[in-house]
Amino acid sequence: MQLLHIDSAITGDQSVSRQLTAQTVATWVAAHPGTQVQYLDVVKDAPSHLSAESLGFRTGQAAATEAERRENALSEALVSQFLAADVVVIGAPFYNFTIPTQLKAWIDRLAQAGRTFKYTEQGPVGLAGGKTVIVVLSRGGVYSTSEGGRAMEHQETYLQTIFGFFGITDVRFVRAEGVGMGPEAKAKALATAEGEIRVAANQPSVAQAA
């Protein structure tokens, strides 16, 4: 089994999401011996944001410049790595009501027609099903318990939508909310998240259940 571990927090060792993704991966490996882990830090090795040079995979045009060839090769490497994984663990902190731009840049490279989705006469069809995604969310405040909070949250809802668009039906969320609301609230948030990690990581993946 192949597991792809993604971190996207810019705060390094102070990051809650990095702490919790490490726990998630360790718990998964303990529960599923033989899992092979690949790691990608999209802050340290950040893919560039989409540009004229990196749109080759969307237009289908052959690369005409060295910059285009380089960007096309990066897009191919990232989507191939993602498609090869049976399980993907993603750390997604909450920045300005959504995900980090580095994580968005990674997702933009995955969204390739013919690789992770296709359009048909009946509408879009996801092509990346058969894998399990565990998303570890960290939030300074609490957004899930009120209508107003949920309206401001474009982190979990975006990730649920985009991975569903890719055809992935098994998306599991681990939530650490209120980590910026004082030591007591942070401790409670971490304890809740650790319990959710045990549940998410001890269940079989879609690939195992098939």
Image (cartoon, rainbow, N blue to C red):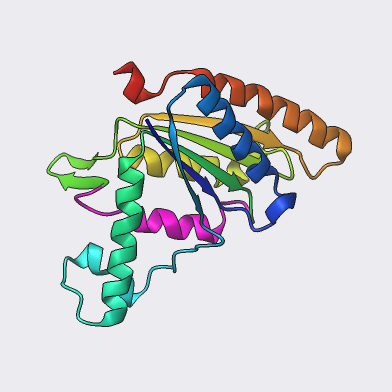
Q: Position of residue 158 (x, y in %)?
A: 47, 45
Question: Between residues 139 and 80, which one lies in front from this camera angle?
Answer: 80
Where, by quadrant of the figure, is residue 127 drawn? Answer: top left
* 160 shown above or below 9: above
- Above or below, 39 relative to 47: above
Q: Is residue 166 magenta?
A: no
Picture residue at 19% right of the left edge, 81% below the top: 64
How far from the left and from the top, in percent, is residue 100? 57, 56
Residue at point 52%, 42% (across, down)? 90
Residue that appears at 28% across and 18% down? 210
* Position of residue 87 measured from the top left corner of the image (x, y, whole percent): 41, 34
**Residue lying at the far bottom of the rendered structure:** 65
Residue lying at the far left in this picture: please name it: 121
Q: Which residues are drawn in magenta?
A: 96-115
Q: How many marks?
A: 0
Left or right? Give the position of 132 relative to 113: right
Residue 32 shown left or right of residue 198 in the figure: left
**Which of the pair 1/79 is nearer the observer?**
1
Indicate the quadrant containing the N terminus: top left, top right, bottom left or bottom right.
top left
The residue shown at (51%, 57%) is: 42
Horizontally, is 181 left or right of 146 in the view? Answer: right
Say which of 93 and 67 sits in front: 67
